Amino acid sequence: MQNEVSYSQTMPNELKMELRSSHAGEMGAVFIYIGILSASCDPHVRAFAREHLRTEYHHLCLFEELIHLYRGSLVLPLWVIAGFLTGFLPALLGRDWVFRTIETVETF
Ligand SMILES: [Fe+2]
């Protein structure tokens, strides 16, 4: 633990910022799929969202394990809300909207 604390103190700020940004992005991704699952009854969309939620949750856990090395984003709740709405709203409109949204997000 002492090595981790001292590593955190010597870690370049750019790396901390990158970890903070990636952590926030994974949090947003998790909530995109939670938003989809909250709105969609389409079995194909739900299976897709469940599979991707599992993957994104795994990514988020990796960054959570390292969070003692950097400060999490102060606007993390906004990432949660934005992610949820990014999944929820297209899911209300149907399958095509969900897949176009995910394609856009993934290529961003
Ligand atoms: Fe991810």
Image (cartoon, rainbow, N blue to C red):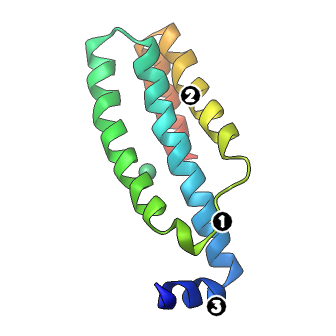
Please rate how many residues cluster around mark 2, counting C-alpha atoms within 10 Å: few if below 14, some from 14 to 19, many from 20.
Answer: many
In the displayed structure image, the side of residue 87 where residue 16 appears, left or right: right
Label 3 or label 1, whichever comes before in sequence order: 3
Q: As shown in the figure, which amino acid type bears the numbered disc 2?
A: Phe
Is 70 above or below relative to 44?
below
Q: Earlier in the sequence, mark 2 or mark 3?
A: 3
Instruction: Please give the name of the residue rendered at 59% of the width and 51% of the height, measured from the top-left corner.
Output: 24
In the picture of the structure, the residue carrying the numbered disc 2 is 84
On the image, the x and y values in percent for residue 57 come to 38, 46
Q: Farthest residue toward the front?
A: 2
How many circles with numbers are drawn on the protein?
Answer: 3
- From the image, state whether disc 2 or disc 3 is nearer to you: 3
Examine the rendered structure and indicate whether residue 24 appears above or below residue 35. below
- Residue type pointed to by label 3: Thr
Which label's residue is closer to the chain start, 1 or 2?
1
Q: Are marks 2 and 3 in contact (CB under 8 Å)?
A: no
Residue at (30, 30) in percent of width and height: 50
Ligand 1 contact, mark 3 (Cβ < 8 Å): no
Crowding at dot 3, Cα within 10 Å, few <14 / some 14-19 / many 20+, comes out as few
The disc labelled 1 sits on which kind of residue? Answer: Arg
Q: Are marks 1 and 2 in contact (CB under 8 Å)?
A: no
Residue under label 3? 10
Element type at mark 1: loop
Left or right of residue 33, residue 46 in this image: left
For disc 1, does the CB lie below 8 Å from ligand 1? no
Task: Out of 53 and 6, give the one closest to the viewer.
Answer: 6
Kindly identify which residue carries mark 1. Answer: 71
Give the percent coordinates (x, y) of residue 62: 40, 61
Q: Marks 2 and 3, Cα distance to the nearest angstrom?
A: 35 Å
- Answer with the quarter of the image where residue 48 lies: top left
